[in-house]
Image: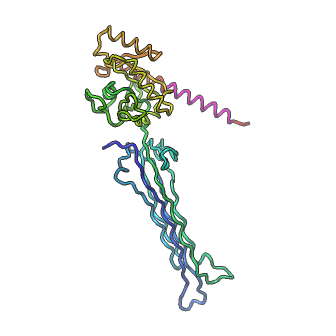
């Protein structure tokens, strides 16, 4: 299945049905009178978050969604049936934006969430609605109200606990395949990964979801390479795993390039907890490894890990480091929720 994380669709709610003009005409019935029924209500446009989807590929083949029109009213005081709703099913992590691409309408983070984007038009009143003591034979009925329409953007941001970032060929896909059951494409040329990937990591008796995104290069925020739009898939992550290719000469420059692109992208990525690892150390001699590890540690101003995704050397240290950060974030959230609850408490 092809991965698609952005789609523009047209939605329109249903028109309301028109009211009916009718009169009762029956033999041997002394009093007739108006009996035109009301029109049915137009269908709504609803977005629902469902399980079993991980891409927006369905919206590549259908971009127009229209709810049903309400049925017109009929004689004998019969109300028209309501129009059918148009339901758009999206995966967890989908965000809905207005046509400008910036105004957020909804953010789906849990299965089962539903939102009505457009409401259908109300049905018109039949002539039975207008009868009164002074107007016993009204010959008027209302038309149904028209539905609403607009274009919206659907954008998918993967739900993952941790995200892999780095330059192309930093070994991100190799790392993902080593610690999960995912089978990403791996090759010795840049931009092997063209679409984000997910995998479930099992460390001890714990599990977390790890996301791999295409590599970034200098100027990605300005459109160089594949751009930086894939960074949206790690916005929700609790921690970033930053891999630096140890076989390149300027490891400090590689680190600073990625940090600059994270800062340019925004979204709070530059402030997220980061686990920095020097990768591919199996291809380095001890002297070169020591030199490049010291250069990277000096550039980052913190501690680093030296690993090899291909051989699995020290990979567990990264995984348990991720778990420590996730536990710390969870404790902070629980503490913040407790403080908020205490502040809201009133005797």
Magenta span contains residue 333: yes
Answer with left or right where residue 59 lies relative to residue 105. left
Colour logic:
rainbow
**Main secondary structure type of the part rendered in magenta:** helix
Q: Quadrant of the C terminus?
A: top right
Horizontal side, residue 11 vs residue 125: left or right: left
Q: Is residue 172 magenta?
A: no
Across and down, in percent, residue 126 comes to: 56, 75
State the residue in front, 330 or 240.
Answer: 240
Q: Residue 296 falls in which quadrant of the image?
A: top left
Q: Position of residue 336 (x, y in %)?
A: 60, 30
Q: Is residue 183 visible?
A: no
Task: Give the image quarter of residue 25.
Answer: bottom right
Query: Does residue 217 appear in this view?
Result: yes
- Out of 28 and 284, give the one closest to the viewer: 284
What range of the chain is rendered magenta?
A: 326-344
Residue 313 lies, with reference to residue 176, above or below; the image says above
The answer to whether residue 233 is left or right of residue 17 is left
Q: Residue furthest bottom?
A: 28
Q: Which residue is pictured at 54% across the width and 72% down the height?
A: 143
Residue at horizontal 32 percent and vertical 29 percent from the top = 173
- Above or below, 329 against 58 in this view is above
Position of the N terminus by quadrant: top left
Point 72% across, 37% down: residue: 346
Measuring from the top left, give residue 166's x and y in whole percent. Answer: 38, 26
Q: Residue furthest right?
A: 347
Residue 247: quadrant of the picture: top left
């Amino acid at each position: 299945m092809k991965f698609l994380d952005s789609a523009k669709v047209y939605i329109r709610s249903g028109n309301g049905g028109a009211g009916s003009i009718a009169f009762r005409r029956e033999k041997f019935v002394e009093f007739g009178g108006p009996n035109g029924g009301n029109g049915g209500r137009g269908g709504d446009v609803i977005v629902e978050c469902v399980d079993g989807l991980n891409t927006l590929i369905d919206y590549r083949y259908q971009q127009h969604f229209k709810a049903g029109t309400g049925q017109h009213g009929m004689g004998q005081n019969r109300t028209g049936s309501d129009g059918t709703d148009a339901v758009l099913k999206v995966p967890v992590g989908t965000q809905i934006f207005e046509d400008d691409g910036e105004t957020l309408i909804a953010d789906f983070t849990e299965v089962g969430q539903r939102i009505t984007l457009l409401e259908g038009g109300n049905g018109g009143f039949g002539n039975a609605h207008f009868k009164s003591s002074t107007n016993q034979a009204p010959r008027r009925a209302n038309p149904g109200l028209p539905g609403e329409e607009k274009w919206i953007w659907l954008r998918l941001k993967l739900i993952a606990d941790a995200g892999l970032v780095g330059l192309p060929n930093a070994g991100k896909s190799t790392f993902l395949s080593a610690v999960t059951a995912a089978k990403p494409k791996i090759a010795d040329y840049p931009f092997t990964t063209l679409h984000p990937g997910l995998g479930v990591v099992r460390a001890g008796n714990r599990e977390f979801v790890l996301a791999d995104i295409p590599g970034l290069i200098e100027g990605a925020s300005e459109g160089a390479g594949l751009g930086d739009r894939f960074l949206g898939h790690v916005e929700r992550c609790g921690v970033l795993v930053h891999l630096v290719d140890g076989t390149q000469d300027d490891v400090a420059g590689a680190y600073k390039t990625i940090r600059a692109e994270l800062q340019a992208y925004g979204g709070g990525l530059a402030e997220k907890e980061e686990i920095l690892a020097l990768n591919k150390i199996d291809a380095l001699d001890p002297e070169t490894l020591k030199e490049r590890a010291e250069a990277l540690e000096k550039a980052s101003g913190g501690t680093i890990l030296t690993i090899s995704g291909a051989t699995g050397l020290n990979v567990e240290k990264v995984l348990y480091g991720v778990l420590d950060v996730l536990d710390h974030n969870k404790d902070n959230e629980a503490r913040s929720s407790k403080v908020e609850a205490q502040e809201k408490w009133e005797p």
